Image: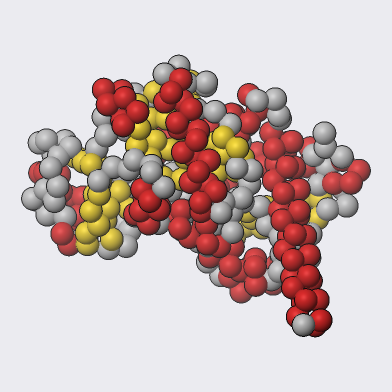
Amino acid sequence: MMDSEKNAKIKVALLLGGWSVERMVSLTKGKAVEQALIEAGYNVHVIDVTDNLSKLTVELENITPDVVFNNLYGKGGEDGTIQAVLEMLKLPYTHSGVKASAIAMDKPLTKTIAKSIGINVADEVLVGKDEITSQNVIKPPYVIKPKDEGSSVGIYMIGSDGANLLPAIQKEWPFENDVMIEAYIPGEELTVAVLDGKAQGVTRIVAQQDFFDYQAKYVDQDTVYEFPAQIDETIYKAAMAQSEALYNKLGCRGIARCDFRFNDKQGLDGLYLLEINTQPGLTAESIGPSQVIANGSTFPELCSHLIEDALCYDKQKQDKHASKTADQKTA
């Protein structure tokens, strides 16, 4: 239950926008978060964030928030940058911290860690932009993607006869030089929301193309989200267990989302992790929140929970620091 009277005394700085290619996603989804926080009774102050971090620092110092709700996506917002600024300012904030955010944004590093705890991942190679030529780097079919972007931005599917597309992709590549080339896993897209270390369930995504890309996620109206996913119970439980394991291994906080591909012809061995997203989309209709809502919550309650989690985590840090300082004085 939300305590509107108590919440009214809590000043929340809501960060929207950012400077990544996902700026408009943040601004659009942020309206839903703002409305949910207001409905929950919080004193909300919206900040449109740009790459001028000095300006952001001044705005935060002027507002003097009790907590920051981070609703930024992509580079800067979910890669540890904003998190480091907020740590420097000693402001509690929602979602994962600096380390977990930075690791999760780095897809190859995330996959290496996932593999170390027994989670299947697709084979991949990391190459420079100049290495995308008319020759296949690995055997097709495969997927070309940036190693550190979100929202399925910049994904290209290369089939057995798609090598002729490579020169055009190289020319148009809008990101930094590093390019991740990943073996394509045929089958279905599955996704699991994790809140406070507990998996919320599995959603099966049925897109009208082979891959759940930016178009299918934000533009197409015929993408189907099946929750709970009508899949084998063993696969369902495995996807949830693996999501919880990776969430805890990285030290994530609040809500996160793990994305998988599943090839049913391989059984349990056909479940492959694609990535973990520490800043999943936040509207009542977004995949992560929709799982939480299906389990009996509301969207304002979820947003309020994330605020409470941030404040609680900050208090635990302060108590730990105070205890350590006291021990040093008595040593």
Q: Quadrant of the C terminus?
A: bottom right
In the picture, measured across the screen, residue 50 lies left or right of residue 147, that is right
Residue 76 is situated, as x and y percent measured from the top left of the image, at: 50, 61
In the picture, measured across the screen, residue 117 lies left or right of residue 29, that is left
Q: Is residue 209 visible?
A: no
In the picture, measured across the screen, residue 207 lies left or right of residue 27, that is left
Q: How is the image coloured?
A: secondary structure
Residue 317 is situated, as x and y percent measured from the top left of the image, at: 72, 63
Which residue lies at the image location 46% right of the left edge and 38% below the top edge? 242
Classify residue 58 by image quadrant: bottom right
Classify residue 155 by image quadrant: top left
Which one is nearer the viewer's eye here, 51 or 322? 322
Which residue lies at the image location 55% right of the left edge and 48% below the top edge? 248
Which residue lies at the image location 47% right of the left edge and 50% below the top edge? 22
Classify residue 193 by image quadrant: top right
Which residue lies at the image location 25% right of the left edge and 57% below the top edge? 126
Q: Is residue 297 visible?
A: yes
Residue 303 is situated, as x and y percent measured from the top left of the image, at: 70, 41
Task: Give the total of numbered labels.
Answer: 0
Q: Is residue 325 above or below residue 290?
A: below
Q: Quadrant of the N terminus?
A: top right
**Residue located farthest toward the right when viewing the structure as drawn:** 5
